[in-house]
């Protein structure tokens, strides 16, 4: 521990902590634009300058460690003037489009300009008026709104190891784009949206399809159905003033009905079906010397990543579709048949925490297994929030309602799909039952509930040791896969039998389409931090603990589905509707 003085307040912190973070320990907020708690500091913006007694120049607080005996001044007239000038310079290369910007009211640059009282342009406007890149139809890059903070590049290259984004040019013409200035759709991009989740301005945003959904809702010839993912319910409230992790399932159902959807289902039902299929797939491989390890397949960004960079692992990949794709296929077959509705009249909209789900619904011919496009439109949580506000619905005053049957009933196992480790935990609950015929005494696995990038454990199932791994963040996934490859090359026992993968750090609760939460005591939206991830994850796990049925194989509606329609897991009909195939895609050098 070291002691120092910040604004005449004595501070005692661990050695190595930056001045920026040390100041927060005593509730002093030093403004910054480039800093994000998830990422290494780049010190690129220059807004966080402070003075240290005995040093001739101002220094940047985000990258300077506090030292024993330091005397730091975080504000005085000169510091404030320098910060204001830095912000004015950034604004000179930024379009004056706040009223029409999707980030208006939740933009860190806008907030700082307001806090520093900038009411008129101090410099000539130098905006380049470059075209937007919406080629992926999942995320949109607007280079004019980029402030060169580097957050998107840090998360894309460092956290995800995808390397789809980089800085082009130098000096004033600097901008973000894929290397070679190609379209994002032609780059290694896996559409995870972590770049948009970490962007402080409107430079990278989700591809907005709310107008498309409004038009579908107004079409009286359509039967509009909607489903919500597990992670949506514990994050959407943040856009309406709730604490992160507050579970608002019932209010969200009500809001969707008020928007005009004819039927409201829950993606959790699809998660329970996923466990029946994927769990059965694992049991079959584990007990019959099949290809192991089995790797989960719920994350479309991971699917894209695997097909591009790890196609040698395709035999290990579960063929089971993701939960929302399963609900889409069952809606236009099983549900349409039961209700006597022409499936060509059905529109399925899924509300997801993820930008890559927009890509998933058209990624292969198996996503049309019902004879139609199984899911017609995918909206992010942020898009749904905007629709609720546009409709004038007072979210906080809504009553709780239930989802519709039969694709609305779910178990606690399905709910935890949204958090890292949740898919594995849910799968083990049912896999153990399928192998032994007995329920697990303790359905929770604490070892895989943390936010560590890679989690490992062994489970004894009727004398059989099952080695599992849980990885989130694609860079961590690669480390796990390389461990498997090394064991195979050396003729060693497999390190794992079952691997859960999620592309986004923290899992779906921190997906690229989730609200940009207020992080701790920081007054500006700074995207999603580990504190937010924990609170959202706990919101899901709390519901699981409070749910009467906590195992997917005990869901009465899922049992009925197999009795009436699918026969049994991994049946011919199940494979046609609920499973997919994978294809090696173009390989990029990173």
Image (cartoon, grey):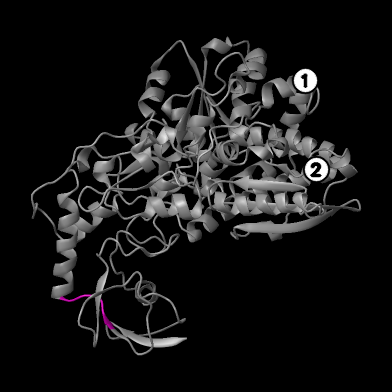
Is 404 in front, or is 214?
A: 214
Is 272 in front, or is 578?
A: 578
Asked if disc 1 and disc 2 are in contact, CB closer than 8 Å, the reply is no
Of the residues tagged 1 and 2, which is closer to the observer?
A: 1
Position of residue 11 relative to residue 199, above or below, is: below
Residue 453 in view, yes or no = yes
Indicate the position of residue 511 as horizontal and vertical percent values. 49, 45
Which residue is drawn at the image coordinates 60% and 13% (left, top)?
A: 371
Is 289 in front, or is 466?
A: 289
Q: Give SS at disc 2.
A: helix
Q: Which residue is mark 1?
A: 572
Which residue is drawn at the image coordinates 73% and 30% (left, top)?
A: 558
Residue 548 in view, yes or no = no
User: Going by the image, does 65 lie left or right of 84?
Assistant: right
First reached walking from the N terminus: tag 1 or tag 2: 2
Q: Which residue is mark 2?
A: 431
Indicate the position of residue 580 as horizontal and vertical percent values. 66, 27
User: Going by the image, does 525 lie left or right of 290?
Assistant: left
Q: Is residue 75 magenta?
A: yes
Q: Give SS at disc 1.
A: helix
Question: In this picture, which residue range is highlighted in magenta?
Answer: 72-76
Indicate the position of residue 217 as horizontal and vertical percent values. 42, 20
């Amino acid at each position: 521990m070291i002691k120092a003085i910040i604004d005449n307040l004595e501070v005692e912190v661990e050695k190595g902590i930056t001045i920026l973070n040390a100041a927060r320990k005593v509730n002093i907020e030093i403004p910054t634009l480039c800093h994000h708690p998830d990422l290494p500091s780049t010190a690129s913006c220059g807004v966080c300058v402070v003075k240290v007694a005995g040093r001739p120049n101002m220094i940047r607080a985000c990258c300077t460690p506090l030292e024993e005996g330091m005397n730091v001044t975080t504000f005085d007239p000169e510091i404030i003037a320098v910060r204001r000038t830095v912000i004015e310079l950034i604004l000179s290369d930024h379009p004056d489009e706040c009223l029409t910007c999707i980030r208006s009211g939740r933009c860190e640059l806008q907030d700082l300009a307001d806090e520093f009282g900038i009411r008129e342009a101090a410099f000539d406007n130098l905006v380049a008026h470059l075209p937007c890149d919406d080629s992926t139809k999942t995320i949109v890059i607007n280079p004019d709104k980029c402030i060169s903070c580097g957050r998107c590049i840090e998360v894309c290259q460092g956290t995800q190891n995808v390397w789809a984004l980089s800085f082009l040019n130098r000096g004033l013409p600097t901008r973000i784009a894929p290397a070679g200035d190609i379209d994002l759709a032609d780059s290694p991009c896996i559409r995870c949206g972590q770049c948009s989740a970490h962007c402080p301005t409107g430079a990278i945003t989700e591809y907005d399809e709310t107008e498309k959904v409004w038009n579908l809702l107004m079409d009286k010839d359509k039967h509009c159905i909607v489903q919500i993912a597990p992670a949506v319910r514990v994050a959407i409230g943040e856009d309406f003033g709730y604490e992160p992790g507050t579970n608002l399932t019932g209010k969200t159902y009500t809001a969707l009905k008020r928007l005009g959807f004819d039927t409201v289902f829950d993606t959790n039902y699809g998660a329970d079906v996923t466990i029946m299929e994927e769990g059965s797939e694992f049991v079959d491989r584990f007990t019959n010397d099949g290809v192991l390890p089995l790797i989960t397949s719920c994350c479309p960004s991971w699917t894209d990543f695997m097909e591009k960079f790890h196609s040698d692992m395709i035999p290990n990949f579960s063929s089971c579709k993701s939960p929302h794709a399963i609900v889409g296929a069952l809606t236009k077959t099983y549900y349409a048949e039961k209700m006597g509705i022409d499936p060509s009249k059905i529109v399925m909209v899924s509300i997801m925490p993820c930008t890559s789900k927009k890509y998933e619904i058209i990624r292969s011919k198996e996503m049309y297994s019902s004879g139609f496009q199984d899911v017609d439109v995918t909206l992010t949580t942020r898009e749904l929030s905007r629709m609720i506000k546009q409709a004038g619905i007072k979210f906080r005053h809504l009553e709780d309602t239930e989802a519709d049957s039969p694709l609305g009933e779910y178990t606690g196992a399905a709910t935890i799909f949204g958090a890292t480790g949740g898919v594995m935990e849910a799968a083990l609950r049912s896999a153990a039952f399928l192998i032994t015929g007995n329920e697990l005494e303790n359905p929770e696995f604490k070892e895989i509930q943390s936010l560590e990038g890679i989690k490992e454990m062994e489970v004894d199932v009727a004398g059989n040791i099952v080695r599992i791994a849980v990885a989130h963040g694609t860079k961590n996934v690669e480390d796990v896969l390389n461990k498997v490859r090394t064991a195979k090359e050396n003729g060693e026992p497999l390190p794992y039998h079952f691997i859960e993968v999620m592309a986004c750090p923290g899992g779906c609760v921190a997906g690229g389409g989730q609200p940009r939460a207020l992080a701790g005591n920081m007054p500006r939206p700074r995207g999603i931090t580990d504190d937010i991830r924990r609170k959202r994850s706990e919101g899901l796990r709390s519901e699981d603990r409070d749910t009467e049925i906590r195992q997917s194989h005990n869901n009465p509606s899922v049992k009925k589905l197999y009795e009436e329609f699918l026969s049994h897991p991994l049946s011919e009909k199940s494979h046609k509707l609920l499973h997919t195939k994978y294809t090696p895609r173009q390989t990029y050098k990173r």
